[in-house]
Image (tube, helix red, strand yellow):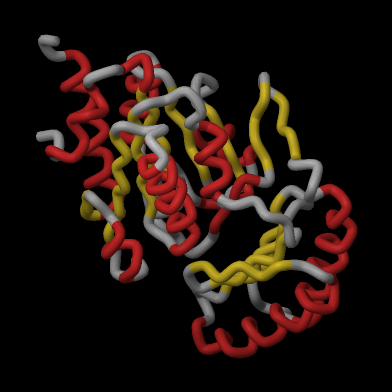
């Protein structure tokens, strides 16, 4: 059954957008980020929605190249690296503000690999680099301290996420700015996420609703043992893990196919 808060999404399909995060939202969290896979039912539901509403997109911290390969849904709009990358006519475009910092990202990635042997250093298409300690939680303090020191030395911003720290260009781009840009012309939208970075997308929905740009704006929290409390408190709808989000997407498809 479709939650009552989401019923506004079926009133004007031609002006409706559904936006979701990737990790922990349409895929389960895994120890190795490279092994993450979209749930088959999530892929099917997103593909079905893409033929029924104005916009379906994934807004993620992942590189766009990864998202395209993992989802295999060319009809979706893909935004990666927390807004620093997007797919435009099949090409991956990096935000011009980030380009001057790419050498610093490369240098920081090399230094992290040298300073933190045994930890997973995820190089994200040259635009950002993430240090993971999910499989070695006892090294959290060390990883945070060295990541912060290296970020400061190279003039990069540091972004906290679950059991990881990401170093990236210090530019005013995040999931919120990406969501605002994507929703231009839409009147109803939802965003589903499960981590701290998704709060920026929640903020964007609130701003758009407050200034009258959206009639319906629904914030969906995907619950897990690691979900930030603030995300749950801010959400209009909560679902139990990626399967719970899949159920909501499938219910939305059913409502859109029903009698109008």
Most extreme residue toward the top is 259
Q: Name the side, left or right, on which 251 lies relative to 25.
A: left
Residue 143 appears at what percent x and percent y? Answer: 64, 82
Residue positioned 29% across, 34% down in the render? 216
**What is the x, y in percent for residue 54?**
41, 18
Q: Is residue 143 left or right of residue 37?
A: right
Residue visible at 67% across and 61% down in the picture? 122
Q: Quadrant of residue 90?
A: top right
- Relative placement, left or right, of 144 versus 54 is right
Q: Which quadrant, please, contains the C terminus?
A: top left
Please indicate, yes or no, whether residue 252 appears anywhere in the rendered image: yes
Q: Residue placed at 31% from the left, 28% from the top?
A: 45
Q: Position of residue 4 (x, y in %)?
A: 12, 38
Nearest the eye: 70 or 7: 7
Q: Say which of 132 and 80 sits in front.
A: 80
The quadrant of the image that shows the N terminus is top left
Picture coordinates of residue 250, whole percent (x, y): 22, 30
Front position in the image: 117 or 88:
88
Q: How many marks do you count on the picture? A: 0
- 73 and 80: which is toward the camera: 80
Q: What residue appears at the point 34 percent right and 38 percent down from the top-left corner?
A: 190
Q: Is residue 26 visible?
A: no
Rendered position, 89 above or below 69: above
**Does residue 79 sit above or below 254 in this rendering?**
below
């Amino acid at each position: 059954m479709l939650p009552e808060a989401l019923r506004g999404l079926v009133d004007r399909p031609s002006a409706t957008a559904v936006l979701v995060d990737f990790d922990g939202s349409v895929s389960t969290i895994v120890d190795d980020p490279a092994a993450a896979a979209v749930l088959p039912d999530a892929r099917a539901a997103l593909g079905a929605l893409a033929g029924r509403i104005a916009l379906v997109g994934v807004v993620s911290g992942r590189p766009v190249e990864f998202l395209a390969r993992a989802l295999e849904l060319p009809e979706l709009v893909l935004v990666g690296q927390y807004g620093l990358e997007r797919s435009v006519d099949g090409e991956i475009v990096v935000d011009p503000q980030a380009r001057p910092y790419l050498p610093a990202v490369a240098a920081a990635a090399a230094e992290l690999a040298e300073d933190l042997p045994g930890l997973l250093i995820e190089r994200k298409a040259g635009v950002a680099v993430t240090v993971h300690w999910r499989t070695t939680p006892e090294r959290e303090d060390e990883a945070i301290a060295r990541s912060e020191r290296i970020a400061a030395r190279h003039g990069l911003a540091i972004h906290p996420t679950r059991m990881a720290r990401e170093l990236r260009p210090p530019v005013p781009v995040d999931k919120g700015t990406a969501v605002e840009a994507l929703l231009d012309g839409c009147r109803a939208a939802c965003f589903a996420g499960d981590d701290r970075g998704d709060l920026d997308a929640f903020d964007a929905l609130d701003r758009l609703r407050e200034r009258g740009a959206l009639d319906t704006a629904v914030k969906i929290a995907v619950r897990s043992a690691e979900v930030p409390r603030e995300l749950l408190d801010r959400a209009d709808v909560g679902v139990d893990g990626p399967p719970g989000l899949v159920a909501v997407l499938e219910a939305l498809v059913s409502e859109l196919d029903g009698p109008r």
